[in-house]
Image (spheres, rainbow, N blue to C red):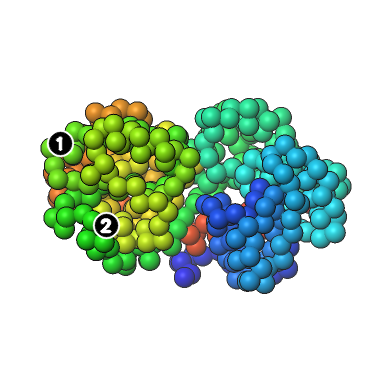
């Protein structure tokens, strides 16, 4: 798809060495896979380096004909990867080194210096508003001049890096995340009987990684009052370290018949099209793909008024925002959308329009291309 006014790259031989922590299946490795494919279409010459495990995404890249290297790192504190990455940089001599995520950023900055590679040709990227590992911000504050730009994928990430890591605005670049909304907009709703849910029951859906930062305990506690007042069922699609604790909490709340842990799914668009409300009560985000997908599917949304989420959702126009950790507010907003169907339809419709016009993945790729050309155009 080419959007009106789409960016057209003027060079077709800019080589990019992408550096990432690992290439196991996950959000950022899959994002890198899509980015590499888009940059090849635009005439760039990509190569990928994984500091750790190569994993499934490495196989996908190689199947596409992309050169992939591994540094065989044994964790975030394996500093041997710096020397190995420096040797790869020396061998490839790319026009740009683009690192994604904290550990890859640190390794790329150090390895570029070790290899004598110009720091003004290094680009780093952060995709979350860090609230748990605050020492990351201190390290970024001390080392950000080891690269030309630090990319953030939402306005909240950029502001956080400026105010908390004290990175000057002229060394930050916003590249808005995005998705292709068409597969979600055109998906067919899943058959509810396949989920053992009554056909006339309302569905509240959550999608993501079962992680403490996602606010899942608040979500299941809020659902207790909703289940008492309605026939709604809740679906949690995804897996992660909190699964065992959630099973215990759901049993304690006597909601095992109404809250369904689906595990990892490959039919998220169909689930979104079947859902009556998408609830997403995270503590913090960078730019959550789950919200973008719910918007594209036209699913009415309740989410928290926190960085990342509020970049996407405008209260009462494209969804409802509630304070993080406020069980009563979350339950009230979900109940409101279940009861006020006209409001729910309007919010879902506006959200779908918003993601198509402002958060399309082709605009994201064009923005990356602009950054690469700006970096290589400088002396």
Q: Is residue 225 left or right of residue 62?
A: left
- Asked if residue 3 lies left or right of residue 111, the reply is left
Give the vertical position of 274 relative to 147 (above or below).
below
Q: Tell me if I can see residue 110 in this picture.
A: yes
Query: Is residue 42 among what the camera can see?
Result: no
Q: Which residue is mark 2?
A: 195
Residue 360 horizontal/vertical position (percent):
44, 59
Q: CA distance from mark 1 to mark 2?
A: 21 Å
Residue 345 image label: none
To which quarter of the image does residue 38 belong? bottom right
Residue 111 in the image: state x and y as whole percent. Answer: 80, 45
Work out whether mark 1 precedes mark 2 in sequence or the reverse, and give the earlier one. 2
The answer to whether the residue labelled 1 contacts the one labelled 2, judged by CB atoms less than 8 Å apart, is no
Q: Position of residue 14 (x, y in %)?
A: 72, 64
- For residue 134, which quarter of the picture? top right
User: Mark 1, residues whose alpha carbon is within 10 Å: few (<14), some, or many (≥20)?
Assistant: few
Q: Is residue 277 left or right of residue 85?
A: left
Residue at the image position 72 percent from the left and 66 percent from the top: 67
Q: Quadrant of residue 114?
A: top right
Which residue lies under the disc numbered 1?
A: 228
Q: Is label 2 in a helix, a strand or a loop? A: helix
Q: Residue at x 48, y 59 (%)?
A: 361
């Amino acid at each position: 798809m080419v959007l009106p006014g789409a960016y057209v790259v003027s060079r077709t031989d800019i080589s990019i060495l992408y550096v990432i922590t690992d290439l196991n299946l996950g959000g950022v490795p899959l994002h890198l896979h899509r980015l590499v494919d888009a940059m090849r279409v635009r005439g760039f010459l990509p190569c990928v380096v994984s500091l750790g495990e190569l994993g499934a995404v490495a196989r996908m890249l190689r199947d596409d004909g992309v050169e992939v290297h591994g540094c065989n790192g044994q964790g975030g504190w394996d500093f041997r990867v710096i020397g190995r990455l420096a040797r790869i940089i020396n061998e490839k001599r790319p026009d740009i080194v683009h690192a994604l995520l904290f550990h890859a950023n640190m390794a790329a900055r150090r390895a570029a210096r070790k290899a004598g590679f110009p720091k003004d040709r290094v680009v780093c990227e952060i995709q979350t508003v860090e609230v748990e590992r605050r020492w990351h911000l201190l390290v970024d504050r001390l080392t950000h001049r080891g690269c030309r730009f630090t990319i953030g994928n939402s306005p909240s990430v950029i502001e956080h890096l400026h105010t908390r890591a004290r990175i000057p605005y002229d060394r930050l670049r916003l590249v808005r995340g995005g998705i292709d909304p068409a597969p979600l907009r055109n998906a067919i709703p899943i058959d509810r009987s396949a989920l053992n849910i009554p056909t006339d029951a309302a569905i509240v859906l959550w999608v993501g990684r079962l992680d403490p930062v996602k606010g899942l305990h608040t979500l299941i506690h809020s659902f207790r009052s909703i289940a008492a007042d309605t026939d709604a069922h809740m679906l949690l699609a995804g897996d992660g370290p909190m699964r065992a604790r959630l099973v215990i909490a759901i049993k304690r709340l006597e909601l095992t018949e109404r809250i369904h842990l689906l595990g990892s799914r490959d039919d998220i668009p169909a689930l979104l099209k079947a859902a009556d409300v998408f609830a997403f009560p995270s503590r913090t985000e960078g730019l959550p793909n789950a919200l973008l997908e719910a918007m594209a599917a036209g699913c009415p949304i309740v989410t928290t008024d926190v960085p990342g989420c509020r970049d996407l959702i405008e209260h009462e126009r494209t969804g409802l925002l509630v304070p993080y950790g406020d069980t009563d507010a979350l339950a009230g907003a979900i109940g409101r959308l279940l009861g006020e169907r006209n409001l729910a339809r309007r919010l879902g419709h506006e959200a779908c329009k918003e993601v198509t016009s402002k958060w399309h993945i082709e605009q994201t790729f064009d923005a990356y291309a602009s950054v690469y050309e700006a970096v290589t155009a400088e002396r």
